[in-house]
Amino acid sequence: MKQIRMKILLSMLLLCSCNKYQVVQEVRVNMYHLHHPTKGAEVIITKDSLAVGEWYNIKRINKIEL
């Protein structure tokens, strides 16, 4: 029973973290280089202040579209 609960918990964590990107560097003021292990790299411009090394859900970041 414990193994089933652990597998369900692990599956839920993996599904919830599918849109999380790690901030690799701040290229310019409010321009960030993000990386996702399976989806690759992305550069975004945002009004938000992001911390290098932290993981963020890309849908929750206020991106500025050009």
Image (cartoon, grey):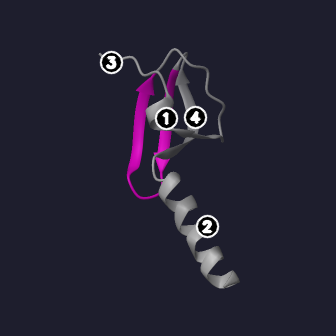
State whether residue 31 is above or below residue 41: above
Quickly name the residue at label 1: 33
Alpha-carbon span between mark 4 and mark 1: 5 Å
Alpha-carbon span between mark 3 and mark 1: 15 Å
| Residue at the extreme left | 66
Looking at the image, tell me whether mark 4 or mark 3 is earlier in sequence order: 4
Tags 3 and 1 touching, CB below 8 Å: no
State whether residue 2 is above or below residue 39: below
Image location (x, y in percent) of residue 19:
45, 46
Question: Is 44 in front, or is 16?
Answer: 16
Alpha-carbon span between mark 2 and mark 1: 30 Å
Quickly name the residue at label 4: 25
Looking at the image, tell me whether mark 3 or mark 2 is earlier in sequence order: 2
State whether residue 61 is above or below residue 30: below
* Amino acid tagged 2: Leu
Looking at the image, tell me whether mark 2 or mark 1 is earlier in sequence order: 2
Image location (x, y in percent) of residue 29:
55, 15
Quickly name the residue at label 2: 9
Q: Quadrant of the C terminus?
A: top left
Q: Residue at coordinates 66% horizontally, 85% vertically from top-left? A: 1
8 with respect to 19 (left or right): right
Quickly name the residue at label 3: 65
Image location (x, y in percent) of residue 43:
41, 32
